[in-house]
Image: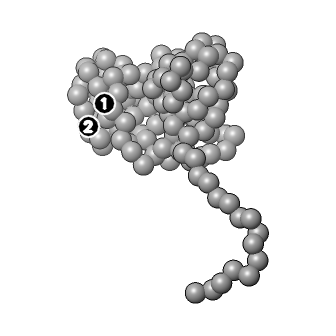
Amino acid sequence: MTEAKVNYNFEESQENVSQVEVVNDLGYAVKHLELVLINGYFGEVREFDGIANGAAGKINIDDKRLIGTTQIDLADVFVLDAPVYFHVANKVLEVTSAAGNVFVGMCTKVNNGVSVEFKPVVQRTSATGLVVT
């Protein structure tokens, strides 16, 4: 074992590194646990009071989890192990890669017409965020 001969006052703390702070520029308030695409990041709103339009708040972009939600296009037929897309304008998950939709994960459980479970993709934590297809 090596003894430290110098005290550099080193400190380290980790907050939830899977959450990013964004400024809601969507033109409307978003609710707690709503799936959103803000500032190039996809995830659910973590603020209990939501995030007002123009306000800052945190969203969870953790890719080491499964997300189950009813925030889907109820007419779509989700397929196990198939891509899941976020329809930016309609604010729901879909099965199609139509222009403007964003690939957000792979389907892990299907309850068509009710809900879907998916594993989110790894997101770049830079200003560019996710790429719209």
User: What is the crowding at mark 2: few (fewer than 14 residues within 10 Å), some, or many (at least 20)?
Assistant: some
Circle 1 Cα neighbour tier, 10 Å, few/some/many (<14 / 14–19 / ≥20): many
According to the image, label 2 marks what residue? 109
| Image quadrant occupied by the N terminus | bottom right
Q: Is residue 81 above or below residue 90?
A: below
**The furthest residue to the left:** 111
103 or 60, nearer to the observer: 60
Vertical comparison of 27 with 110: above or below: above
Q: Position of residue 87 (x, y in %)?
A: 48, 23
123 shown above or below 44: below
Q: Is residue 46 left or right of residue 12?
A: left
Where residue 58 appears, as percent x and y from the top left, is: 58, 32
Q: Are marks 1 and 2 in contact (CB under 8 Å)?
A: yes
Look at the image and tell me in which quarter the C terminus lies. top right
- Sooner in the amino-acid sequence: mark 1 or mark 2: 2
Element type where label 1 sits in the image: strand
Q: Which residue is mark 1?
A: 116
| Residue 4, quarter of the rendered image | bottom right
Give percent across and percent down for residue 91: 48, 19
User: How far apart are labels 1 and 2 at the CA level?
Assistant: 6 Å
Amino acid type, callout 1: Val
1 vs 93, nearest the viewer = 1
Residue 14 horizontal side relative to residue 90, left or right: right
| Residue type at the position of mark 2 | Lys
**Between 1 and 112, which is closer to the camera in this rendering?**
1
Counting from the top left corner in percent of width and height, residue 113 is at: 25, 20
Say what secondary structure mark 2 lies in.
Answer: strand
